[in-house]
Amino acid sequence: MAELLAVRGLRVDFATDRGPAQVLDGMNLDIETGEVVGLVGESGCGKTTLARAILGILPEGAARIRAGEVRFKGTDLLREDPAAVNDRVRGRAITFIPQDPFTSFSPLFPIETQIMDLMKWKSPRAGNGGGPASILGRYPRARHRADREAALEILRAVQIPEPARALRRLPHEFSGGQRQRLMIAMALLPRPDLIIADEPTTALDVTIQAQILRLLRALVKERGVSVLFTTHDLGTAHEICDRVVVMYAGQEMEAAPTDAFFGRPAHPYTRRLLASVPSPGGEIRDIPGEVPSLVTPPSGCRFHPRCDYATAECRDVRPALRALAGAHGIRCHHPVDAPAGADP
Amino acid sequence: MSAPAPPLLEVVDLVRHFPVRNAFGRRVGWLRAVDGVSLAVQPGETLGLVGESGCGKSTLGKTVMGIYTPTAGDIRFAGREIGWLAKRERRAVARDLQYVYQDPGASLDPRWKVVHLLHEPLKIHTALSRAEREREVLAILAAVGLPDAHLDLYPHELSGGQQRRVGLARILTLRPRLVILDEPTSGLDVSVQASVLKLFRGLQEAFALTYVFISHDLAVVRAICARIAVMYLGRIVELGPTAAVFERPRHPYTQSLLAAVPRIGGRRVTQEFALEGEPPNPRDVPSGCRFRTRCPHVQARCAVEEPPLREVEGRRVACHFA
């Protein structure tokens, strides 16, 4: 498969009262065409910051990109002309599904207004300039008709009943699951190469979550779209992803194909994280210690204060990324070679 | 199931309806949040109450707690009817019966130091002297795993996890007998969730607590609860020992709910998952069996006759065909 997105050595600092917080510290990520990649990690590990850095919507003023590149189809988005990124990439080649389907629609306008407003600028049928020249510009009639047809078709694909009537309704007339279906529809409409889905099922009940995950996976596989799926729920990552990347304190710790990731995790952090999922037998294992401060992160390996295998080397030397067999990458001095669950 | 000890909490045919009003304040219908629920909680056990949002599990917890008054039915706590008590008498029960919200840390007054926060419930509910209160507070603080030095801090100086511990300490200073935990781990990362669950378990042993554990997270319920009640649209559809219900769910809703939980390792459950549609609006409950609109095994009888909870294989199930 071909490389679609490659993040290399990305460093992002956030200004805080106590000094700069190193939210991303040499982060790497690869996504191939048509691949669903899961980005898992605990709150505060930098998942959302990475997603926003790829989309180019980091909060201005607070965030500073210190180093690294975000290569998308060969061009570095961080160094590309911002206007060109806005026209061709953000919202078109890369789209976004937010976590919360309840607050992501405007409550004042019918669904049709909100979808057509997006399509006016981001339709695959709008030229390279990305729609009208100004906000007052006309929406060409023929394109409007074609875009509306496409919208109806995609609403059918996400299984919204009676799409034509649904377009006239207001967001509050839809349930949470249906609103998330509408969000998926809007993310697919510009015919993107990559969808960034930020915990899209966290706010939903399990039966609805199962429906949405199945739908999303089927739709992107059918269309050959890549997905970066961030989640803190490991079970969800197992359901939908081809490959899983685990983040801890602003760095990727381990990346592997889904089966290897869950079956033979090599990083002590990954193993601890998997073990903290409640087991049917009622055994509960937590990870001792707390998530480190990003203003004064630990030296060497960022996980060493909480690690069962830490040595002096881990305290002093920052582990480099290295490859294990089977497209399995890891950032650790002492990778564990054992099936999941076999720990001291 | 044999029950040698009398139940600590017994709920009989409990109903709580909320009026639905139009823009002019006229009642146009009833939202049947809890619609005839009966269950018993034995002393020292943990009963899990699961179901999807809107199934009435929180309303049930809050009605037992006295936050809502019941529309009909009985609530018996330690052999005494408490659903219909006058406010004054009800307050005396509040000591024994405590409610833990999703984030007990969020309910701390930001202007009070921890020491003040922990003394307050004792001042209101007990006649202990200052020295006795001090001793009590220190004991509780140690039990939830916080150092004494934290007594002089304000809530904002503590981390989220520590705030949560202070919130729990506040509830435990009164030595309650029954604690209702309402979604205590939702929104937490798995590693933090594991330490919170460990804490709950340790406290249950240390203080001989009885828990009602309300959650939508089936993995957590399976790990921590001995018995489980599954709710759908205001009613219990299946009630029994956790292990048995998880291994062989008998109600079609329980089966679908368990099938929807993402599992790590093995096949993807979403490839086989079959349940379509969403729960109906509790303002407009289907006739007969409430689950019939989504049930894969629905038959004509289901639309006419509401199935009662009946004994099947050591548990109770509300389905004609279980």
Image (cartoon, rainbow, N blue to C red):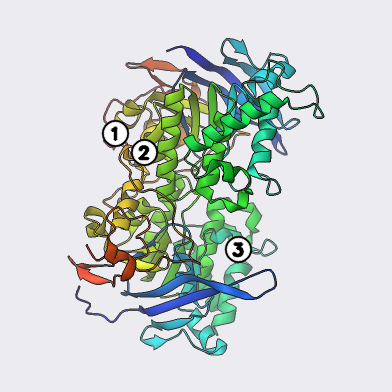
Count neighbours of disc 3 (C-alpha within 10 A) and say few if under 14, some if 14 to 19, many if 20 or more. few
Vertical placement of residue A2 versus A204, above or below: above
Same chain for the residues under marks 2 and 3 in the image:
no
Task: Tell me the SS state at disc 2.
Answer: helix
The chain under label 2 reads A
Q: Position of residue A206 (x, y in %)?
A: 41, 49
Task: Tell me the SS state at disc 3.
Answer: helix
Task: Tell me the SS state at disc 1.
Answer: loop
Same chain for the residues under marks 3 and 1 in the image:
no
Q: Nearer the viewer, residue B244 or A102?
A: A102
Q: Amino acid at mark 2?
A: Leu
Could you say which quadrant of the image residue B308 lies in? bottom left
Position of the C terminus of chain B, as image quadrant, is bottom left
At a point 67% along the width and 20% down the height, the residue shown is A126
Q: Earlier in the sequence, mark 2 or mark 1?
A: 2
Could you say which quadrant of the image residue B55 lies in? bottom left
Residues at badges 2 and 1 in contact (C-beta under 8 Å)?
yes
Q: Badge 3 is on which residue?
A: B107
Q: Badge 2 is on which residue?
A: A274
Q: Position of residue B213 (x, y in %)?
A: 40, 63
Q: Is residue B172 visible?
A: no
Vertical placement of residue B103 versus A33, above or below: below
Q: Nearer the viewer, residue B286 or B38?
A: B286
The chain under label 1 reads A
Position of the N terminus of chain B, as image quadrant, is bottom left
Q: Amino acid at mark 1?
A: Ala
Could you say which quadrant of the image residue A185 lies in? top right
Mark 2 → mark 3, Cα distance in angstroms = 31 Å
Residue A340 is tagged as: 1
Mark 3 → mark 1, Cα distance in angstroms = 39 Å
Residues at badges 2 and 3 in contact (C-beta under 8 Å)?
no
At a point 41% along the width and 43% down the height, the residue shown is A211
